[in-house]
Amino acid sequence: MEHLVFEPDASEELRYAYTAEVLETDWTRFDNLFDFVEPLTPWLGFSHDSIPLGKFMDYPKSAGYEIAKIWNGDFGDSHNMMKTQPAFEVGRRVASLLQAWLSIGLMECVIGKKIHASYLVRRARDGTQCLYTRNLHFCLHARVVQIRQGRVDKAKTNEEMQQWVQEVNKWTTRFTCWSHPSFRPKMDGPYPGFMDLIESITPAIVRLAGVVEQTRLYVLPDYEHMGQLTWQLPFNVVERRRDSLRALGWCPFQIKFMEDTLTQSVVDWILATHFQQDPIGHEGCTAIACARSDIDRKTYRQSHCCQDEHLCARLFPDMGSVVKILNADMIPIVSLKQDSSGSTLQVKGSSRSEAGLYIAFSHVWADGLGGATEEGLHRCQVERLDKLCRLHAESGWFWLDAICIPSRATVGDAVYFKALVAIRDVYLQAKTVLVLDRTIEKCDSKASTESLYAHIYLSSWMLRMWTYEEAVLARDLVFVLADGFHRYSLQTQPWMRRTVCTVWQSLASQLYRLRVVPGELTIGHIYRAFRYRLTNVPAEEFLSVSGMLGLDTGKLLSVKGEERARQFWLMLRTVPHDIPFAMCPKMTLNGFRWAPASMMWPAQTGIDTAPGGRKAFCTEEGLVGEYVVFELNTTLKGSAGERSSIFNIWSNGCSAPELGAWAGPGLLRVYCVDSWPAAPATHDFNILYMAKASGDILSQGQWVAAAAALGERRELGGDSRRIRAVKHIDRVLVERLQNAELSQSPASIMFEGRERTSMHASGNSNLEEICIS
C-alpha cells in the first residue's frame, strides 16, 4: 500500500536500483521511514531467495511444485513433501508459494534482476514480517530508464509484461472462485486456514500487478495493448472493505459505483487516506440508487450562503423578458446590477448558434441552487454567483437553470420545451462552464492531483444525468474549489511517479469521458457515462442524449414512454454491434427487445465507443448485424437459480477462421444472469449469439457477455435475402471450459469430471447476419 500514498525522494536508492545485480534492503539503516499503510499484508515466509531468477511461469517448478495440481485444488499431490505434512501446513505452504510467485516473483521478472524478499518485506511493530512497497518507486523507475536506453527488446518486453499480468489475473480470479460461499467449504475442509491466508494476500497481489501494468503503459505506450483486465477479490475481503467504506460515510450506491468503475487500488487508497463522505442525506440509499439527490419539488427549499437568512430577499428576472427571449430561439442570460436603489437581475438574449461571453453554471439541486424563473433565487446566492463570474471572467453575465428556465406549469408546453431543447446550445456556446458541488469545493488548489480527481469523481455532480451533457459540451470546463478554480485539462499530470500512479490513472481515465473530442461523441460514450447517473425525471433521458448527439430533440417531445425510446433508436439508426449485451433494462416492443429502455442502470458492462467500430443497424423490424451464432439442437428453458441457470453446451465449432476462439470444438458453460425470471418460471431459447470481437480476445476460462434468443428463417423487409430472425430473450454469460479440466476423467475440486458432466445441448457456431427483434 505504501507506494500508493508516499513518494520518497532518494536519488541514492534510485542509483542502487539501477546498478545492483541483486536488490535487497537492510531496513535498520534508515532513521525516518514512512510507516506501514494499513491494512498490512503478512509475508507468509516462502523461501523466495533460494529460487533462481528465471522465467515467470517456471517459478513454481523451480520450487518443486506442480502448478496444475494447485490450479485444480489437489494441493496434497503438488509437491513430494506434502504427503507427510498436516492439512493446515499443506495449505499454508501453497499459499506462501502463490504469494511469493505472484508478487516478488512477478516484480523480479519485470525488473530483470533478482529481488530478495528483504527489498519488499519489512518487520512491523509487532514483529511480524509484512509486505512494504516503498521501494517500488525506485526499482520500477530504474527499469523505465533501462527500457528507454534500449537495453531490452521493447516489443518482447511489452508482450511479456502483459502475459505475466494476465497470469496473475487468472490466479486472483481463481482465488475469488474458491472464496464463493457455495464453494469455499470444499477448500476449508481439506485445507483448513488456506482461504484465510489467500484473503490476506490477494489485495496486495492485485495492487502489485496494477503498478506493473501502469509502468508498461507509461514506458511502452505505442506498443500493442492486449485488452483491459477485470480484477476481483475474495468475497470476504470485499465485504470487509464495504464495511470500512460505510464507516467513512459512503452509501451503498457510491460503494458500488467505486467497485464497478475504479481499480481495486483506488478503493484501497480511499480507505488508506480516510477519504470521508458526509452521510447526511444518504439514509435511504440502496445499491441501485442514491437518495441524496432525489428532489421532491413540493418540499424543496433553496439554501442560503449568508448568515442573516431572514434578511436575504429573493431576486427575480423579468419573466416576460425570459419568455420573449425563448420564443425568439435565443438563450436568456442574467447579470446582477447593484446601485443605490438595490439589487436587480438584468436579462438579455444570447445567440444559440454563436459563441457567447457568458458563464453557464453546472450543479446539482441537492446543493440548494434549484428552482425556476418565477421562483427567483436568494440574493446571497446571486451575489456569490456574480462574484465567481467576475473572478473567472470580466463579464458578469451567466446562465443558471433555476433562473433561466421557467416551469412548465407557468409558461405552458411550447415555451418550456423551447427551454429544454436550448439546453444543448446553452452549454455548447458558453465561454466557460463553472461546476459547483459541495464535495468538490472541499478540495483546495494545493491538493494532489489524485485527491482533486477523487473529489470530482466521487461528487454528487458526477452522478446526475444532465451534468454529463453540461460537461461534455463545454468549450471550457472549470471546477470551483475551496480557494480558487481548477480548469480541467487532459494534460494535467499525476502527483505520484508515473510508474506507480495507478490511482491517478484509474480516476483520470474515468474523468476523460467528460472531454470527448468534438464530433466523436458516440452512444457508447454516453452509455458508459450514464450507467451510474440518476435523474428525478426519467422521461427526459433520451431528450438529453439526443441533444448531445445532435439529433432532432423536438421530434421526441410529442411522444412518451417506450415510444420515445423507440423513436430515438430509429433516429440514431447506427449503433455499436454489442449493444444487445448491455446490462440494463430492455424495451418490450416488438423489434426492440434488444434496445436499452434506459442507460441509467448500475452495471460493469460497457459498449463500444469507437466511432469507426463494428456497427449494427436499427430498423422497424429489429437490429440487423453480423454476430457469432450458436444454433442449438434443442430448446432449453432458462431461469435465475442455482440449478436452472447453468447449462453445459458442446460446440461442434466451424471452419470459419474469423471466429477466433469460437471456431474450434469445445465445452461451453452458459449462465443465465439475475435478470432472468426466478424459478420455476422460465424463458425458452435455442440460439446463442455474441459479438464477433469476443471471439478475437477470448481466453479459456473467461466469461464473455452473450444473449439467448429464439430463432427462425424468414424474409426481412421484402429483401430477397433470407436471414435468420431471432427474438431476443435475455443476456447470458458464456465460458469456454479449460481444456486441462475437460480432459480429466475423475472429478477434481473445480470440475465434476468428464464422465459425470451432463450435456444439455450441442450446436454449431457460425458467423452470420441476423435480425434481432
Image (cartoon, rainbow, N blue to C red):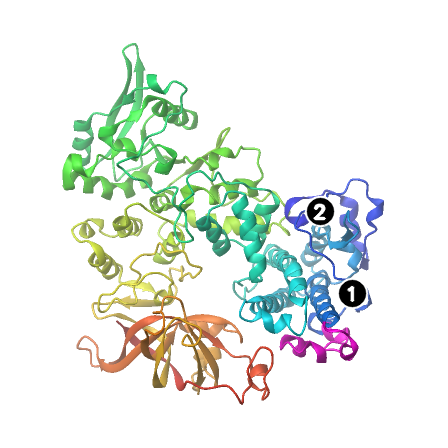
- In which quarter of the view is residue 527 placed? bottom left
Few, some or many residues within 10 Å of mark 2 (<14, 14–19, 20+): some
On the rendered structure, is 66 left or right of 298? right
Number of numbered callouts drawn:
2
The residue positioned 69% from the left and 60% from the top of the image is 150
Q: Position of residue 78 (x, y in %)?
A: 71, 78
Query: Can residue 4 be seen in the rendering of this structure?
Result: yes
> Left of 691 or right of it: where is 568?
left
Quadrant assignment for the C terminus: bottom left
Can residue 327 be seen at all in this image of the molecule? no
- The answer to whether the residues at label 1 and label 2 have Cβ atoms under 8 Å apart is no
Q: What x and y, as percent, mark residue 134?
A: 72, 49
Asked whether 573 or 245 is in front, the reply is 245
Residue for badge 2: 36
Q: CA distance from mark 1 to mark 2?
A: 22 Å
**Mark before the other along the chain sequence, 1 or 2:** 2
Q: Nearer the viewer, residue 509 or 291?
A: 291
616 left or right, relative to 227: left
Q: Quadrant of residue 764?
A: bottom left
Instruction: Tell me the amino acid under the disc marked 1.
Output: His
Q: Residue at x 37, y 63 (%)?
A: 582
Asked if the magenta segment contains residue 703, the reply would be no
Q: Is residue 64 above or below residue 259?
A: below
What amino acid does circle 2 point to? Phe
**Which one is nearer the viewer's eye here, 543 or 763?**
763
Report which quarter residue 341 is drawn in. top left
Q: Which residues are magenta?
A: 60-87
Q: On the image, numbered disc 1 is attached to which residue? A: 48
Q: Is residue 190 above or below residue 376?
A: below
Q: Residue 689's spot in the image, x, y percent?
A: 37, 75
View extreme (top): residue: 340
Q: Is residue 490 left or right of residue 599?
A: right
